Image: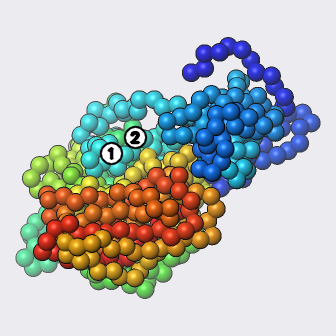
């Protein structure tokens, strides 16, 4: 906090700007009397010490060749000059350990005043970055009584880092369509449920005595032995859609139950699954209607969803009919999230996991490994917590449920496992992103989730996409307060063999057309085949020869392959030039190759 109580001289009167301005959105500015109309220079999140609080200081990083990068006197003179241009009285405060300059903005500045100063620094080609000196606070823990059991939201090892996103967004203003078994009444979810629809056209499958109607209530999907197929055992009702919906948007800070990832969002339940499953035709209509399309015989949707979650699937590659419905939904601006499947097989053989234009989600366990049941492969985009209950129930995903073995009974909570549980984590994240920045397209949402993921702390044989989803980093990125929204990607697909216990090999990528330095969250995607990954040392080599360790050798890391995305703070490096991936096998008996790698700026 500032200790000086003196007021700085105000040089220019400027207009107030709403703190709700989002990246990539155009917002009108309220002007004072005869001041000319103008647009804010930068998004709100880049001018605030905390949401709604203008920054009092800026952290300015200069490029390595600039005089201000080394000379305090030069940095002080630059602050004075920038302040004069912006109409503010700026002071160089001190040099940070990173080499950046801390600049004091004076007192009583509005967000627009700060925006003017930030714009001056951003326009200077010698400035690598300028960010607010943000105010950090202890992250509040929701008062939901079962929150401590939701490891999937907050645990350091393999949680999705959700609490760090809640200071920015809670999902407010976004509807998520849960295309599933429908909804059974639950007091920890009901306030966030909006009208949906029952799309099950076959009365036997529907198990509610009729076909399609406007009531998406889940009557239960229990089956008798052999009812669906010869040899099948009897099953009790799953209440699957209610469990999925609770992960996305259970009411939070209500002193009971669990916390939802996007607890400010609304859920529209759409019934497509009943006894023995559900048909593609009903699912296609649900996708169409959820995203604002027209379905014959069904009233117009008053709660059009910006996110669809489908924790469902079947064998066989994505059909043309399903793909067509998904494409149309995405073209309407709806992000489609799907489960990768639970067959411990390549997801390319399952639908809708293998469809294009979806975010296909694999499941990770509490240690950050691919869950034993989760599908995998190149069609998988991202991993999220899906849990494993086979040994310890508490290692599963806790959410809203019902105790009824057949029809509804009393509400309760229980642990489930599955990619069905992983997908709603990402759907909830998509809702947070859309709430933070309504202008985001489905492609931008997918790109940002991948770009801002972190490497799985465990292993994933077969491929789990870009890594483990990170809610805080991703939401910060799309709100303009850090991270990367997924920029230009440079890729090398030239395979390079890695000699056994030999010299390091290098694979180059030439970056051009960029300006300034690389980002502080440069994404390095690596695809290496190797029969004992613990032998490998992997480094990123910058154009000037600086090295960044991505992976060290470890005798305890006996898994195959290195398929991961690493985040590197490369803000001190010039973006353009030849970057290299350097890989060395440090022990005998195993060989491999670099299949491909990429840099995303």
Q: Which residue is mark 1?
A: 153
**Image quadrant in which you'd find residue 164:** top left
At horizontal 22% and vertical 60% (from top left) the residue drawn is 553
**Image quadrant in which you'd find residue 12:** top right
Q: Are marks 1 and 2 in contact (CB under 8 Å)?
A: yes
At horizontal 45% and vertical 49% (from top left) the residue drawn is 473
Name the outermost residue toward the bottom.
320
61 left or right of 528 in image: right
Q: Position of residue 91 (x, y in %)?
A: 69, 28
At horizontal 74% and vertical 17% (from top left) the residue drawn is 7
Q: Residues within 10 Å of mark 1 (few under 14, many from 20)?
A: many
Establish if 285 lies above or below 89: below
Decide which of 300, 58 is in the foreground and name it.
58
Decide which of 323, 348 is in the foreground and name it.
348
139 left or right of 134 in image: left
3D distance between C-alphas at marks 1 and 2: 7 Å
Name the outermost residue toward the top.
5
512 left or right of 564 in image: right
Decide which of 321, 462 is in the foreground and name it.
462
Which of the image's four quarters has the N terminus? top right
Q: Which residue is mark 2?
A: 163
**Image quadrant in which you'd find residue 183:** bottom left
């Amino acid at each position: 906090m500032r200790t000086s109580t003196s007021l700085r001289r105000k040089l220019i009167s400027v207009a107030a700007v709403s703190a709700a301005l989002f990246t990539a959105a155009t917002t009108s500015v309220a002007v004072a009397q005869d001041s000319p109309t103008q647009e804010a220079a930068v998004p709100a999140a880049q001018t605030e010490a905390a949401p709604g609080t203008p920054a009092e200081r800026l952290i300015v990083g200069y490029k390595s060749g600039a005089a201000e990068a080394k000379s305090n006197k030069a940095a002080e003179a630059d602050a004075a000059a920038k302040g004069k241009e912006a109409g503010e009285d700026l002071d160089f405060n001190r040099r940070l350990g990173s080499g950046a300059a801390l600049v004091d903005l004076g007192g009583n500045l509005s967000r627009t005043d700060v925006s003017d100063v930030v714009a001056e620094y951003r326009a200077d080609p010698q400035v690598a970055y300028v960010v607010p000196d943000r105010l950090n606070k202890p992250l509040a823990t929701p008062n939901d009584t079962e929150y401590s059991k939701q490891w999937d939201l907050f645990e350091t090892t393999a949680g999705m880092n959700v609490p760090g996103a809640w200071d920015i967004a809670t999902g407010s203003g976004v509807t998520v369509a849960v295309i599933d078994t429908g909804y059974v009444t639950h007091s920890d979810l009901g306030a966030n449920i909006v009208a949906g629809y029952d799309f099950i056209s076959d009365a036997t499958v529907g198990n509610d005595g009729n076909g399609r109607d406007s009531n998406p209530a889940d009557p239960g999907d229990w089956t008798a032995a052999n009812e669906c197929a010869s040899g099948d055992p009897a099953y009790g009702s799953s209440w699957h859609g209610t469990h999925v919906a609770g992960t996305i948007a259970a009411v939070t800070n209500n002193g009971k139950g669990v916390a939802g990832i996007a607890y400010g969002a609304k859920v529209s339940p759409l019934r497509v699954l009943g006894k023995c499953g559900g048909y593609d035709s009903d699912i296609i209509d649900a996708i169409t209607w959820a995203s604002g399309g027209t379905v014959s015989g069904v009233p117009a949707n008053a709660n059009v969803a910006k996110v669809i979650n489908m924790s469902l699937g079947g064998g066989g590659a994505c059909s043309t009919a399903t793909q067509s419905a998904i494409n149309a939904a995405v073209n309407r601006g709806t992000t489609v999230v799907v489960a990768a499947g639970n067959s411990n097989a390549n997801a390319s053989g399952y639908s809708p996991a293998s469809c294009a234009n979806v975010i296909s989600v694999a499941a990770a366990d509490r240690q950050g490994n691919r869950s034993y049941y989760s599908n995998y492969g190149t069609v998988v985009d991202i991993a999220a917590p899906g849990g494993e209950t086979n040994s310890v129930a508490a290692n599963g995903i806790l959410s809203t449920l019902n105790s009824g073995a057949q029809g509804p009974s009393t509400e309760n909570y229980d642990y489930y496992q599955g990619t069905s549980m992983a997908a709603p984590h990402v759907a909830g994240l998509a809702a947070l992103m859309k709430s933070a920045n309504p202008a985001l397209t489905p492609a931008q949402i997918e790109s940002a989730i991948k770009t801002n993921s972190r490497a799985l702390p465990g292993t994933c044989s077969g491929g789990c996409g870009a890594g483990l989803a990170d809610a805080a980093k991703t939401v910060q990125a799309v709100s303009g307060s850090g991270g990367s929204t997924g920029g230009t990607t440079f890729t090398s697909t030239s395979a390079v063999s890695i000699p056994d216990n030999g010299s390091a090999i290098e694979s180059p990528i030439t970056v051009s057309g960029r300006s300034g330095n690389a980002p502080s969250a440069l994404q390095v995607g690596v695809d290496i085949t190797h029969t004992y990954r613990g032998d490998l040392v992997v480094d990123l080599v910058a154009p000037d020869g600086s090295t960044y360790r991505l992976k060290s050798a470890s005798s305890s890391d006996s898994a195959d392959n290195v398929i991961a995305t690493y985040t590197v703070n490369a803000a001190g490096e010039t973006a353009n030039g030849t970057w290299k991936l350097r890989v060395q096998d440090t022990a005998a008996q195993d060989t491999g190759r670099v299949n491909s790698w990429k840099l995303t700026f």
